[in-house]
Image (cartoon, rainbow, N blue to C red):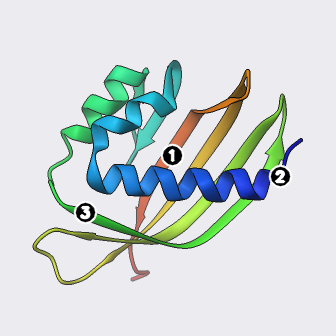
Amino acid sequence: MSDFNAIAQQFVEFYYKTFDGNRAGLGALYKEHSMLTFEAQGTQGSAAIVEKLQNLPFQEIQHRTDTVDAQPSADDGILVLVTGALLLGGESKPMSFTQVFQLKNDAGNWFVLNDVFRLVYPAA
């Protein structure tokens, strides 16, 4: 397998730059059998995922990644765990998040098979 850490890092940089600037551009990263779980709500398929992301209740966002961990997985895949913070437009306090991606290789092109996103709230 190629350098899975480098692939994961490049993917994460591209994903959040695109998410912050042009969410519609994320459609090319998903396929019809891809699945997104965003705050416990599941969505399947590239078009439905992009629609979900574009209809989130904010327009401006900035992501900061703090950690990116990757492991090779079955069938030439890569499991990626991201932790970080995001700042919504008009807000002054960032929120922590975690996100997991299962990347799959399709004839040399990587796509997101599974994507799970959660905000991380401070412990009470």
Q: CA distance from mark 1 to mark 2?
A: 23 Å
Mark 1 / mark 3, whichever is N-terminal: 3
Snapshot quadrant of residue 67: bottom right
- Horizontal side of 43 relative to 24 (left or right) equals right
Q: CA distance from mark 1 to mark 3?
A: 18 Å
Badge 3 amino acid: Ile
In front here: 120 or 57?
57
Residue 105: % across, % down: 72, 29
> Disc 1 vs disc 2: which is toward the camera?
2
The single residue placed furthest to the top in the displayed view is 32
Q: Is residue 42 visible?
A: no
Mark 3 / mark 2, whichever is N-terminal: 2
**Label 2 Cα neighbours within 10 Å, binned few <14 / some 14-19 / many ≥20:** few
Mark 1 / mark 2, whichever is N-terminal: 2
Residue 108: % across, % down: 73, 28
Badge 1 amino acid: Val
**Label 3 Cα neighbours within 10 Å, binned few <14 / some 14-19 / many ≥20:** some
Q: Is residue 93 above or below residue 13?
A: below
- Horizontal side of 77 relative to 38 (left or right) equals right
- In the picture of the structure, the residue carrying the numbered disc 3 is 61
In the picture, the quarter occupied by the C terminus is: bottom left
Snapshot quadrant of residue 46: top left
Residue 9: % across, % down: 64, 59
Specify the label residue 116 is tagged with. 1
Is disc 2 placed on a helix, strand or loop?
loop
Q: Is residue 45 visible?
A: yes
Is disc 1 placed on a helix, strand or loop?
strand
- In the picture of the structure, the residue carrying the numbered disc 2 is 3
> Disc 1 vs disc 3: which is toward the camera?
3
